[in-house]
């Protein structure tokens, strides 16, 4: 895992470059502006995303969480960090902070807004951010509309089934359902012989009172779009047959 000290030092270097070269024409727009995305060579399933984050004065970022750790260094202004289970904290220029994986948070811009260099270390193939609505996780629609190739789906399935925090089940309709710890992740991989193969449904779910994941949104697909959409629309619940273990 990337050491926090190394990330902090790199943040200092990047922040100096950002402020020295910053002009009205080069300053990024409000939001999370990706600067770099690269694999972590010492771990096959991890990647790092470096973002230049701009929060306007008084603006509130919707409540969300990230699949991995988030390391941030504030280079301008201030923000109120609102994190579930913790007291609100003011982060000002020069402050650094680490947000644990899946910690729900909703930062709010201070009087002059805030700018921070943010490093996210998380599992390759997962979305950068999951927004939390009143009814639970809201899928990243941009990621959900992404069309993956069959080899990419196969690689994602192998990676998912190998995770110690994921439990996979064989389903009734030639598919494998994999649930992440805490019920926040749902992968459904169709198998050979299925009309929508190869297809993967990722996230887009709610947990019913009986504990069964209920399908809520379509997911990634490498099959014919019409076949995949018809398949997903035909299902409201995934009936389990047997556990894969």
Image (cartoon, rainbow, N blue to C red):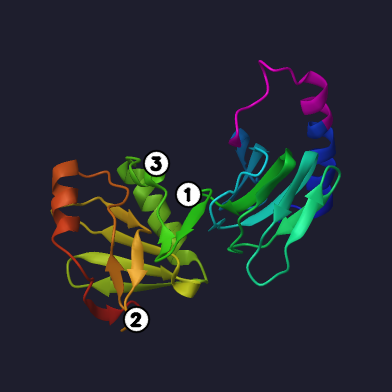
Q: Judge from the rendering whether residue 128 lies leftward or rightward of residue 174; answer left or right.
A: right
Q: Position of residue 62 (x, y in %)?
A: 53, 52
Q: Is residue 167 magenta?
A: no
> Could you tell me if the residues under marks 2 and 1 are in contact, i.e. CB atoms within 8 Å?
no
Q: Which residue is mark 3?
A: 142
Where is mark 2, residue-wise?
211
Q: Is residue 167 above or below residue 190?
A: below
Q: Which mark is residue 125?
A: 1
Image height check: is 100 above or below 56? below
Q: Secondary structure at mark 2?
A: loop
Residue 25: numbered disc: none
Q: Residue drawn 74% across and 42% down?
A: 111
Q: Nearer the viewer, mark 3 or mark 1?
A: 3
Answer whether residue 40 is visible to the viewer in this image: yes
The front one of 226 and 42 is: 226
| Residue nearest the viewer, comparing 76 with 126 | 76
Name the residue at 30% across, 44% down.
Answer: 150
């Amino acid at each position: 895992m990337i050491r926090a000290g190394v990330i902090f030092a790199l943040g200092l270097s990047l922040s100096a470059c950002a402020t020295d070269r910053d002009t009205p024409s080069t300053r990024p727009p409000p939001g999370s502006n990706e600067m770099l995305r690269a694999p972590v060579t010492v771990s096959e399933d991890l990647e790092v995303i470096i973002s230049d984050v701009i929060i306007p004065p008084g603006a509130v970022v919707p409540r969300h969480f990230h699949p991995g750790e988030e390391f941030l260094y504030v280079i301008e202004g201030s923000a109120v960090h609102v994190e579930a289970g913790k007291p609100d904290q003011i982060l000002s220029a020069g402050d650094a902070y680490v947000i644990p994986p899946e910690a729900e948070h909703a930062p709010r811009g201070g009087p002059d807004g805030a700018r921070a260099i943010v490093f996210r270390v998380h599992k390759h193939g997962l979305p950068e951010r999951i927004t939390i609505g009143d009814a639970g996780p809201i899928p990243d629609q941009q990621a959900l509309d992404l069309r993956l190739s069959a080899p990419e789906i196969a690689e994602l399935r192998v990676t998912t089934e190998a995770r110690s925090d994921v439990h996979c089940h064989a389903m009734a309709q030639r598919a494998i359902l994999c649930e992440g710890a805490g019920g926040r992740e749902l992968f459904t991989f169709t198998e050979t012989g299925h009309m929508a193969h190869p297809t993967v449904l990722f996230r887009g779910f709610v947990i019913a009172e009986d504990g069964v994941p209920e399908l809520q949104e379509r997911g990634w697909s490498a099959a014919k779009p019409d076949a995949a959409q018809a398949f997903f629309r035909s299902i409201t619940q995934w009936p389990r047959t047997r556990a894969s273990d």
